Amino acid sequence: MIIAIDGPAAVGTGTLARGLAARFNLAHLDSGLLYRAVAARVLAAEGDGSDPDQAEKAARTVTVESLSEPGLRSERVGRVASKVAVHPAVRQTLLGRQREFARRPPGETAGAVLDGRDIGTVVLPNADVKFFLTGPLNVRLARRVKELRARGERFIQARVEQDMRERDQRDRSRAAAPLAAATDAHVIDTTELDAEAVLETACRLVRSSPRTSRTKVRRVSGAPSDTAQKVRSQESP
Ligand code: DC
């Protein structure tokens, strides 16, 4: 089973992806980390993300293994990640890494869940289930601020808000693979929903999806019934 999740900054795509990965025994790839790893390399070379050749060169050295590098989740790296993400050559280079992950998910898993900005539209247009999360800027900002506080990062709230506004605008308006909902995505407005409610809504939609209902529920041998996991059935293509 392949699940695609997209949405703007701090809307909760990562939290939903981790939740679905745990529920359905899927490998998870946070595709934003790939762009962040490119940004970290560009910053280390004293770039600002605007030079397409420098960014492409950096992208070629990024692999899924690069994603545990420290510091990738900082606001500074996120800002430059959005800038390197406008270059088509960077996107093309990272496209292969993401598709390869979905084709051969690591570990003993029943598939993969990827989250980002263009997963359902460009990276995995044939994903079994697609979600697009939405939420107004003020709600997303409050979540990001809470997250930064929990991580003990120092920040100026007005700067975080400004960055988020600019990043959303850049991600939505770029020519190459802009942030957009796939026409066949389930759109979930997260304004009134906490993370648990978003996960429950998504789980219901996964279970009722015509694509995943072609998969059988298999119990892990000897495990309690609530650890049932979905696996591709023999007759699935
Ligand atoms: O999700 P995030 O904040 O970690 O992503 C950082 C930036 O990476 C985001 O502003 C745009 C870019 N990105 C992208 O263009 N396409 C993706 N699939 C994922 C992230």
Image (spheres, grey):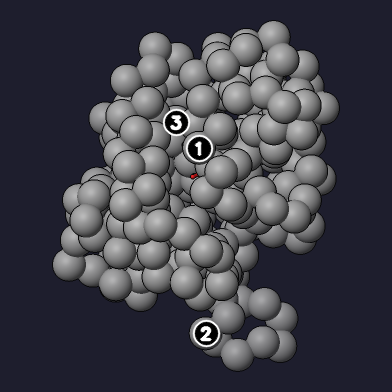
- Whether pointer 2 and pointer 1 mark residues with C-beta atoms closer than 8 Å, the reply is no
Q: Nearer the viewer, residue 3 or 32?
A: 32
Q: Is mark 3 within 8 Å of ligand 1?
A: yes
Check disc 2 and report the residue beneath it. 226
Please report the residue visible at 52 percent of the width from the left and 64 percent of the height from the top: 154
Q: Earlier in the sequence, mark 3 or mark 2?
A: 3
Amino acid beneath label 3: Asp
Q: Nearer the viewer, residue 160 or 184?
A: 160
Res. 205 visible in picture: no
Q: Is mark 1 within 8 Å of ligand 1?
A: no
Foreground tag (2 vs 1)? 1
Relative side of 177 to 85, left or right: left
Res. 39 visible in picture: yes
Check disc 1 and report the residue beneath it. 79
Quadrant of image for the C terminus: top right
Quarter of the figure with residue 166:
top left
| Cα–Cα span, label 3 and label 2 | 33 Å
Relative side of 214 to 88, left or right: left
Query: Of the numbered discs in the image, which one, if any, rests on residue 118?
Result: 3
- Label 1 neighbour load within 10 Å: few <14, some 14-19, many 20+: some
| Cα–Cα span, label 2 and label 1 | 41 Å
Amino acid beneath label 2: Asp
| Cα–Cα span, label 1 and label 3 | 18 Å
Up/down of 65 relative to 10, above or below:
above
Please report the residue visible at 36 percent of the width from the left and 70 percent of the height from the top: 195
